[in-house]
Amino acid sequence: MSALKVVSSKLAAEIDKELMGPQIGFTLQQLMELAGFSVAQAVCRQFPLKDKTEAEKGKHVFVIAGPGNNGGDGLVCARHLKLFGYNPIVYYPKRSERTEFYKQLVHQLNFFKVPVLSQDEENWLEYLKPEKTLCIVDAIFGFSYKPPMREPFRSIVEELCKLQDRIPIVSVDVPTGWDVDKGPISQPAINPAVLVSLTVPKPCSTYIREKHTAHYVGGRFIPRDFANKYGFEPFGYESTDQILKL
Ligand SMILES: NC(=O)C1=CN([C@@H]2O[C@H](COP(=O)(O)OP(=O)(O)OC[C@H]3O[C@@H](n4cnc5c(N)ncnc54)[C@H](O)[C@@H]3O)[C@@H](O)[C@H]2O)[C@@H](O)CC1
Ligand SMILES: [K+]
């Protein structure tokens, strides 16, 4: 295990609560926008379009969004990827009815002409071919996932596991199926090529295979004294970057 700065799931939830509490007053929408923006930047850093052929530039980034806020990060990420010149497609099989906000994120994707597959799309795997797909963004589950995995996500993640050696997966915050503190202790569980930890890495990130997985931190929205209060130093982001490769 590396000497990475990490915070437990309990502390991560406390950080979120305080950031969105009455004293600080961030809204979830603000943080999600920055989180999704960071993930889009990490995709650009890892899979730059510069010097690519037109065929490679036309490949899809397949974004799979789960039912909670991790999924929301994915929806935001897809919109920014489109602005960055990528070709995202979104699969959002279980849509949250909790807040109007998620519907608004889908409207925004329609506005940007980002295809959002129908909820009961049976042929979603057709979009996942090494020759057609640049990478997959795994925005299925983040730090609130509790096994065992329920359908339809179990079948989806099982399919992704079969493909992950041929198409790189970019996991948002926590690789889907991993316990946020203990890592890949149950199946199915994704083995990502890229992990983008948000705010601060969670303990599960110490279980990534360093040679196999590029690790970025993103979600650049806390000041030094707040980080210190939770026991870590802020990350050394350069210039206007929203991500830092660890
Ligand atoms: N401060 C931060 O770091 C921020 C974090 N955000 C994101 O928010 C995520 C946490 O979001 P949430 O708390 O909404 O949780 P998640 O998005 O991790 O998952 C919650 C959803 O998954 C479902 N679920 C949980 N276990 C399941 C199982 N076994 N089978 C099927 N469904 C299951 C729940 O019913 C719920 O709908 C973070 O990981 C991060 O990606 C950002 O959106 C905002 C800022
Ligand atoms: K994830």
Image: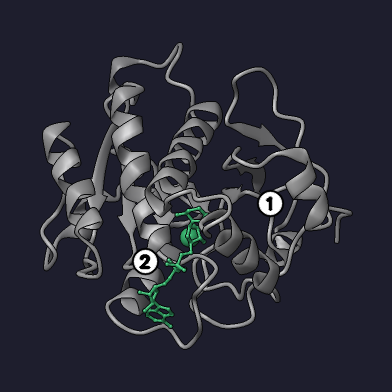
User: Where does ligand 1 appear, by image quarter?
Assistant: bottom left
Q: How dense is the environment of label 1, judged by Cα within 10 Å: few (below 14), some, or many (20 and up)?
A: many
Picture coordinates of residue 96 (x, y %)? 24, 67
Left or right side of 213 for 55: left
In the image, residue 241 sits, relative to residue 39, either above or below, namely: above
- Which residue type carries mark 2? Gly
In the picture of the structure, the residue carrying the numbered disc 1 is 200
Asked whether residue 5 appears in the rendered view, the answer is: no
In the picture of the structure, the residue carrying the numbered disc 2 is 68
Q: Residue furthest top?
A: 51
In the image, residue 158 sits, relative to residue 15, either above or below, namely: below
Left or right side of 222 for 7: right
Q: SS class of the residue under badge 1?
A: loop
Picture coordinates of residue 7 (x, y %)? 74, 62
Picture coordinates of residue 13 (x, y %)? 60, 68
Q: SS class of the residue under badge 2?
A: loop
